[in-house]
Amino acid sequence: MLIDAAFQGLSWNLAHDVRELFAFHFMVNALLAGTAVAVMGGAVGWFMVLRRQAFAGHTLAMIAFPGAAGATLAGLPIAFGYFGACAAGALALAGVSGRHSRESAATGTVQAFALGLGFLFVGLYHGLLNGLQALLFGTFLGIDDGQVRTIVAVVVVALAALAVGARPLLFASVDADVARAAGVPVRLLSFSFLLLLGLAVAATSQITGALLVFALLVTPAATAHRLTSRPLVGLGLSVAIALVVTWLGLALAFFSVYPVGFYVTSLAFAPYVVARSLRR
Amino acid sequence: MLTHEFMRNALLAGTFIGAACGFVGYFLVLRAQVFAGDALSHVAFTGALAAAALGVDVRIGLFAATIAVGIGMGGLGDRAHPDDVTIGTVFAWILGLGVLFLALFTTSGSATNGTAAVRVLFGSLFGLSRGDVALAVAVSAVALAALLGMSRPLLFASLDPRVAAARAVPVGLLGLGFLGIVGLVAAEATQAVGALLLLGLVAAPAAAAHELGRTPFAGLALSVALAVGSVWLGLVLAYEISQLPPSTAIVGVAAALYAVAAAYVRLSGQFGEMSGSSRKP
């Protein structure tokens, strides 16, 4: 009964279902934006997992929420709020980075403070609940052409930056001390990567919402790291998993009443469990 | 201010919750496990919404989810110390489940259900009933007693797990028990400051105490004092400024305390280096 209610409109004819998926403009937009975001999330996430910066990534994802809420309150475009807040968050995190245990505490403080601000902004802006849920949990229904263009542009810039910096970043991530001795600007790279992570998070959270960005960043990458330690293969695998998960998640959400965030996180988690049990 | 019952309730519950958060936070920072606390706060969200969707008391869902996941996370890692990526992957999925429960809950129930999710996420110290306060006091007291009982071996196991293991301290068991207690405190604090903001009450006072405190037990006491102080000051601020939600005020005060502590230590550290007396590393 639950399944029947969940999948209205899904027939056994797969070709027909796929055609129906592309019949609506909003769905095409969602798939385009989702594809762009998944490619970037998979690639940036792979480096994030390699650098053990999951907490920083999650904090940046949370910072997207006050950014968007603040922009709504100030009457600015929401995209502006997302990118501005995530850039500011990357700066703040770079400022507190240092010894490990203190760093995680400072990161947590930054995150909680940003969330507190977000709650205050939402309270001050009386538009309230529906908007709040969209900010936190995302929506793939209302992505317009302009948003798709912004997201694709951001993804192209981010991937280009990542491609340029990939080799030294890999070196600095794997062995910071040796890289520093070899003249690699480790601190600059570390800051640039946080900025890139902020960019990726800001673009992604416009679709998945602030609470679920993290799933797209960490889970495919963690699976790839479990399966292979070769950088290029791992990067490709991470991007591939992110893509498949996003497409399937969007398609399932289209045919059912349940939210896209649930499908994306669950579909991403399944291969991780398999990979973990294969390679203990 | 104290003539209002909601304010007395908030102060009483907030004091105990703050003390428990400060205590737990000190060890979380010491063990570099703040991210685990972050994860548990999100699990609290899923637990509460699952209970709401099933029509059970929200508090049952909260406690069951956070304690189970806390112990489960301990089981996933080496010596009950799982790494960030594992934690992140697991809680990203659990958060996705939370979204599903939210959808189930809001489609099946009445229109007031939307506010329940917000309440879980951002807390409602001003909306606590007498029963809530009694529960908060009892849970915090139990958590504090358990932590006090295990604080010496836990300190040993946190500072040097290998030597502690060699001295027959049950390092893994302690880590597991500790994460269980973190889950308990997270569930209780969710009622007060909300799932999204409890991290501030756990991380910020403890981080400030680690900056300032010289010995572990002085730091521990300082962490508890700062957390309770943040709650009091935050509540007073929120009472005076009606626009300001109590959760935001509390976390704001805690973050400000940490910023001041860090700045003070940096500055005095610079002067200290000039005069030749250096802080311990």
Image (cartoon, coloured by chain):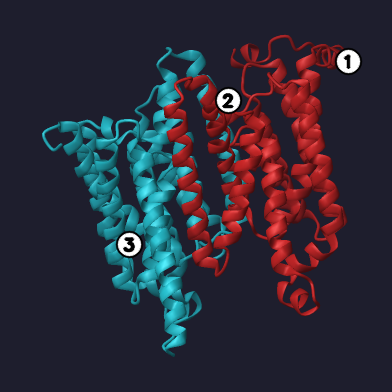
Q: Is residue B54 visible?
A: no
| Residue B78 image offset from top left, x and y in percent | 56, 64
For the residue pair B207 and B156, the one nearer the viewer reads as B207
**Quarter of the image where one finds residue B30:** bottom left
What is the distance, in whole Å, between disc 1 and disc 2 at their CAs? Answer: 31 Å
Which residue does the numbered mark 1 point to in the structure image? A15
Q: Is residue B148 left or right of residue B267?
A: left
Residue at left offset 69%, top offset 67%:
A187
The verdict on a common chain for dots 2 and 3 is: no
The disc at residue B223 is: 3
| Residue wearing tag 2 | A134
Q: Residues within 10 Å of mark 2 (few under 14, many from 20)?
A: some
Q: Is residue B119 left or right of residue A141?
A: left
Rendering coords of residue A181 (x, y %): 76, 80
| Image side of residue A169 versus residue B176, left or right | right
Query: Residue A142 location, x and y as percent?
Result: 68, 19
Q: Chain of mark 2?
A: A
The three-letter code of the residue at mark 1 reads: Ala
- Quadrant (top left, top right, bottom left, bottom right) of the N terminus of chain B: top left
Which chain wears cyan? B
**Residue A259, x across and y down, in percent:** 62, 23
Mark 1 or mark 2: whose residue is earlier in sequence: 1
Q: Which amino acid lies under the numbered mark 2 shown in the image of this protein?
A: Ala
Colour red, chain: A
- Name which residue lies at 53% across and 33% down: A70
Viewed as shown, does residue B238 lie left or right of B2? right
Q: Are dots 1 and 2 on a single chain?
A: yes
* Residues at marks 2 and 3 touching, judged by CB atoms closer than 8 Å: no
Task: Say which of marks 1 and 3 sits in front.
Answer: 3
Disc 3: CA contacts within 10 A as few (<14), some (14-19) or many (>=20): many
Q: Is residue A259 visible?
A: yes
Q: Is residue A32 above or below residue A232?
A: above
